[in-house]
Image (spheres, grey):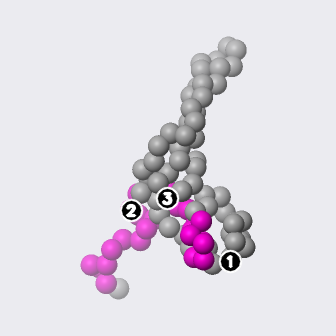
């Protein structure tokens, strides 16, 4: 065993992973077996850089509870979370 090798991805810290179609380059956040755009089956796992912009923002108020805020972020890779 080589002790100078880089640590496995699981030890590098939190990562936001997504799938990218090898044929049409569509980015997919949720798990898929086939690309919904082209029907291709070659989906590759990639790690997002985590940069993007807020697409939608909302405040959720429930009577008797503190208000919560939620945002939909469009990441630079082309998908929303």
Q: Does residue 10 show up magenta in the picture?
A: yes
**Label 1 residue SS:** loop
Q: Which residue is at a point 56% across and 32% down the rendered structure image?
A: 57
- In the rendered image of this protein, does residue 72 appear above or below residue 27? above
Q: Which residue is mark 1?
A: 41
Measured in 3D between alpha carbons, the distance from the residue under mark 2 to the one under mark 3, in whole angstroms, is: 21 Å
Q: Is residue 8 visible?
A: yes
Left or right of 31, for residue 81: left
Q: Nearer the viewer, mark 2 or mark 1?
A: 1
Image location (x, y in percent) of residue 67: 59, 20
Q: Which residue is at a point 57% across and 76% down the rendered structure image?
A: 22
Q: Dot 2, how many residues are within 10 Å of its Cα: few (below 14), some (14-19), or many (20+)?
A: few
Image location (x, y in percent) of residue 26: 59, 65
- In the rendered image of this protein, does residue 50 appear above or below residue 67? below
Q: Residue furthest bottom?
A: 1
Quadrant for the N terminus, please. Answer: bottom left
Marking on residue 77: 3
Measured in 3D between alpha carbons, the distance from the residue under mark 1 to the one under mark 3, in whole angstroms, is: 19 Å
Q: Residue furthest top?
A: 64
Q: Nearer the viewer, mark 2 or mark 3?
A: 3
């Amino acid at each position: 065993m080589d002790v100078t090798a880089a640590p496995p991805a699981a030890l590098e810290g939190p990562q936001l992973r997504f799938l990218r179609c090898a044929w049409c380059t569509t980015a997919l956040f949720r798990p898929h077996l086939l690309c919904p755009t082209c029907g291709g089956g070659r989906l590759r796992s990639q790690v997002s850089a985590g940069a993007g912009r807020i697409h939608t923002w909302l405040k959720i108020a429930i009577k008797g509870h503190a208000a919560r805020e939620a945002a939909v972020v469009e990441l630079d890779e082309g998908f929303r979370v």
